[in-house]
Amino acid sequence: MLLSALAPALAFGAEPAAIPAPPTGSAADYATLPASGSSRGTATTGPSADYATRSVSASSPGTATTGPSSSLSTAATNSSAPVPVAPSEIPYPGRRMSSDEVLRIAEALPAVRRERSRNPGAYGGAYLKGPGRWQVSFFSRRAKEIVQVYIADATGRVLEQWTGFQVAWTMARGYPGAFGRHVNALYVWLPLCVLFFAPFFNWRRPFSLLHVDLLVLLFFSVSLAFFNHARIGLSVPLVYPPLLYLLARMLALARPRLRAGTSAVPPLPAGTPLRPGPALRLLVPPLWLAMGVLFLLGFRIALNLTDSNVIDVGYAGVIGAQRIASGRPLYGGYPADNEHGDTYGPVNYEAYVPFQQILGWSGQWDDLPAAHAAAILFDLLAVALLFLVGRRVRGPTLGVALAYAWVSYPFTLYALESNSNDTLVCVLVLAALLCATSAPARGVFAALAGLTKFAPLALAPLLATHGLREIKVPAGPRRWAGRLARARALGAFLLAFALTAAVVSVPALSHDSWHTLYERTIVYQANRGSPFSVWGLYGGLGSVQLGVEIAAIVLAVGLAVVPRRPDVVGLAAAAAAIVIATQLGVEHWFYLYVPWFFGLVMPALLGRLSDPERLPTPAGGGASEPARSSLPASFSSSGLGRPSAMDPPPRSQSAPASA
C-alpha cells in the first residue's frame, strides 16, 4: 500500500513544478538550469545553515551580485548571478530577445498579473540569468521580490515561474537531485523501502504493531515525494503525523514496566512463572542480514563517491576546519557563497579537521573530498555503534538487525548522499547510549553532541539523571551513603560535561567572544524564518509554536526526573521522544533531521521485544506451573525469537521453583 502510494510521486528527474505549471521547454531550454542553492557552485546570500540556502536571485537582483571573497573563484558564483539589463526594444548583444520583450512575456502570465494586483505599484525588471536565459523579477513597493520568471532566449518559452516563498527559497522548487542525487530515483528508493521492511515482517502476526512502526518510519517518503515536486503545501504538513506517532510510541516504550531481569523489578519470589514477550521473528537468518549489511555498506560508499553532492552544510564543515587548522577565527567572515555556514557548534567544525588536513581544500565549493570522507566515516560509525548497542541490549543478533536497519533505511542514505553533518549528531548520541552505565562518559558525549548542533543539549538532563534511581538509598542511618553515591554520579556527569565543553570551545573562544558565538549561532537560528515547518509555512501560529517549545522543555526535564524504564531500551526511547519533541517546535525542519532520532527509535522498537513477563499467579500466591519458571532454552537471549550461533547461551531469568 505504501509503495503504491509512493510510485507515482517519488520520481527522480521530474521537472520542477511551477506556480502555475510552466509550459514545457525543450532540452536546450533546461540545459542551463542551476542546481538548488544548497548545491555546490551556486551563489547564496540567504541562510545556509541547515540546508536553508537561497540563491543570489532570491534577493534584489540588481544589488545582490557581489562576488565572494578572493579565496573563491568568481566563475563558481557569478555564472548564475542575475545581471540587470536596461529597458530597451533592441535585442541585447548576443541574445535574440530584448529586455522589453521578455518583460512583456512575463507580464502576460496569470500568476504575475495576480501578484501585481495584490501589490499595487509593483514593478518589474529584466536580467540576464546565465547563458541562454532571462530572468524577470517583480518587486513590491517595499522592494520585496514577489515573482520570479525564467525565460529561454532562443524560444521565448517560460521555463519557470515562482511566487511566494519559492521566490526566495530555491530548495523549495524541487530541482532534481539538489539533495541526495539519484537516491531519489524510484529504482533506488523503493527497493530500499522493501529491504528495510521485509526482514522484520512476521507472517504469523501481519497486524503487528512493529509493522505499523516501520511503515510510519517509511511514511516520511510520501512527504519527500511532494517536496521533490515542489509541492511544499503538502510536503510540510505530512511530516507531522509520523512525528507525532513516533513521539507517542517512544513515550509509551519509556514507561516503567514490570519486567524480569531489570533492576527496576524487585527480586522475584521463588516459583514466579515467566513467559517471553512478543518475539521479533526475522524472515531471514541473522547471517544473511550480516551479509546484507556488508553489501549495502559497499553500495552506499560507492554511490557517495560517484554520485553524491556536497550541500552547504558539508561545505561549511570544511571551511571551519580550515580556519581552525590555520588559526583563524571560527565565526564570522565566511565566503559569500556560504555566508551563514558558521551557525553550528565548534565540535561540528573540529570533526572535519582531520579530513581537511589529509585531503586538503582548494578554497572553492568544488567536489570537497574532505566532506565526502567525513560523511562516510560518520555513516560507518553509526553502523558500528548500533551493532554495539544492540549487542549490549539483546546480543549480537539484535546488533546485526540494528546495523541492517540503518544501512537499508533510505533516509540515512539520503543524508549520506547529501554529505551533511546530521549523522554525526546521531553518532554522538549513540555513543552516549552505549556508555549508559558510565556517568562521566555520558557527560562527555552529551557535551559533544550538544556543541555539534545545539538541539541535542535537550538530552543533557536525561543523560545526567540516568541510573540515579537504581542507586539504592537504604533506610536508617546509612541513608546518607546512598544519597552521597547519587550525588557523586551526578557530579561526575556535570564535571565531565563542563570540562568537555570547555576544551572543545577553545578553538572558537581563542579568537571570538561568547557574544560573537551566541550571535552567529543561537540568535541567527532563532530569528531566521523558513517555510519548511507549519510555523513558517502558514504564519500566525507563534503562540502555538511557543507552547510546543515549552512542552518540549517540560518533557525533557520531566523524563529526567519521573520514573521510567531504567535500561538502555528505556533510555533510547526517552531520548528519541525528546529529540522528536524538539523537532516539532523548530522553525526549520528538513528530511536530513530524520537520522537524528532514527538511531534511537530502532533500538527502542526492536530492543523491547522478547522481554520476559510475569505470568498471572494463582490466588494465594503459589506457583501452579513450576516448569514455566524460566524461559525456554530455545529462546535466544538476543531477543530475536530464534536461536543463533551468534548469541551467547541463554541465562536463567528467575529463581528455581520451590514447593
Image (cartoon, rainbow, N blue to C red):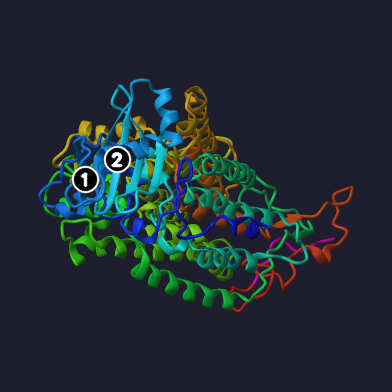
In the image, what residue occupies the spot 69% across and 67% down? Answer: 281
Figure quadrant of residue 514: top left
Residue 559: x %, y % from top left: 54, 38
Q: In this view, does 523 lie above or below 152?
A: above
Secondary structure under badge 2? helix
Number of labels in the image equals 2
Figure quadrant of residue 204: bottom right
Quarter holding the C terminus is bottom right
Residue 121: x %, y % from top left: 33, 21
Residue with the mark numbered 2:
101
Residue 3: x %, y % from top left: 63, 60
Q: How crowded is mark 1: few (under 14 residues within 10 Å), some or many (20 or more)?
A: few
Q: How far is disc 2 from disc 1 in space, using C-alphas?
A: 9 Å
- Does residue 236 appear in this view? yes
Residue 38: x %, y % from top left: 33, 50
In the image, what residue occupies the spot 68% across and 52% down? Answer: 259
Q: Give the range drawn in magenta.
A: 650-659
Q: Disc 1 residue type?
A: Pro
- Is 187 on the left or on the right of 438, as rendered? right
Q: Main secondary structure of the magenta part?
A: loop
Labels 2 & 1 near each other (Cβ < 8 A): yes
Residue with the mark numbered 1:
91
Q: Disc 2 residue type?
A: Glu
- Residue 656 covered by magenta stretch: yes
